[in-house]
Image (cartoon, rainbow, N blue to C red):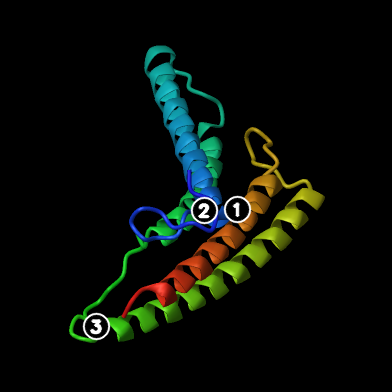
């Protein structure tokens, strides 16, 4: 197994901490969505069979989906999987396109930091005021706080991907 500083067989650097955290978050998000899908399926079946579903299922789906979306974003960024429009840059040099990609990565990191900061402030406020969901009284501040932390992971991932663009050959 290659060490942290060693390159992989294809010349790319080995995955770092941000890569491992992003992959772990994506797996967590997938498991969360799988659990939400199973819960919705159970609720629908219970409604069909017994005219009574899982109480508060919509609240759990809302929270799980919000958390899962933010769990997927860092890996999506590292894999350069975000949607982009290259209508105006189809015929520009690769070096200019990399410059634009780095610029947008930096801007994305800035917005992710801003979003993360405000989510953490909001999460702490929701925890302090004991804000909860309406049906099940699930404390939502912890989910908001977790999403805020994931936004900081996203910011780290955007900075890592910008640095990787710097290392690409011209």
Looking at the image, residue 140 sits to the left or right of residue 93; the answer is right
Pointers 2 and 3 in contact (C-beta within 8 Å): no
For marks 1 and 2, the one nearer the N-term is: 2
Q: Quadrant of residue 12?
A: bottom left
Front-lying residue, 165 or 4: 4
Q: Is 162 situated above or below 20?
A: below
Q: Residues within 10 Å of mark 2 (few under 14, many from 20)?
A: many
Is residue 4 in view?
yes
Q: Secondary structure at mark 1?
A: helix
Q: Is 115 situated above or below 38?
A: below
Residue 157 position, x and y percent, is: 51, 62
Looking at the image, residue 35 sits to the left or right of residue 92; the answer is right
Pointers 1 and 2 in contact (C-beta within 8 Å): yes
Residue 82 position, x and y percent, is: 36, 63
Mark 1 to mark 3: distance in Å? 33 Å
Q: Is 131 situated above or below 45?
A: below
Residue at horizontal 52 percent and vertical 24 percent from the top:
54
For marks 1 and 3, the one nearer the N-term is: 3
Residue at image mark 2 = 70
Residue at image mark 1 = 147
Residue extending furthest toward the top: 50
Residue at horizontal 61 percent and vertical 71 percent from the top:
114
For marks 2 and 3, the one nearer the N-term is: 2
**Quadrant occupied by the C terminus:** bottom left
Mark 2 to mark 3: distance in Å? 29 Å
Mark 1 to mark 2: distance in Å? 6 Å
Label drawn at residue 89: 3
Q: Is 78 situated above or below 25?
A: below
**Nearer mark to the viewer, of 1 and 3:** 3
Is residue 129 in view?
no
Front-lying residue, 65 or 70: 70
């Amino acid at each position: 197994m290659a060490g942290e500083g060693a390159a992989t067989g294809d010349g790319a650097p080995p995955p770092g901490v941000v890569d491992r955290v992003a992959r772990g978050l994506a797996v967590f998000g997938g498991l969360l969505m799988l659990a939400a899908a199973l819960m919705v399926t159970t609720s629908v079946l219970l409604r069909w069979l017994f005219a009574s579903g899982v109480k508060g299922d919509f609240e759990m789906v809302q929270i799980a989906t919000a958390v899962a979306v933010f769990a997927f974003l860092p890996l999506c960024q590292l894999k350069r999987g975000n949607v982009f429009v290259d209508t105006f840059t189809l015929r520009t040099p690769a070096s200019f396109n990399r410059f634009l990609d780095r610029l947008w990565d930096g801007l994305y990191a800035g917005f992710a930091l801003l979003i993360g900061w405000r989510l953490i402030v909001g999460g702490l406020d929701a925890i302090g005021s004991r804000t909860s969901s309406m049906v099940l009284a699930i404390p939502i501040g912890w989910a908001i706080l977790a999403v805020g932390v994931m936004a900081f992971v996203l910011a780290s991932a955007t900075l890592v991907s910008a640095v990787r663009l710097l290392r690409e050959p011209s």
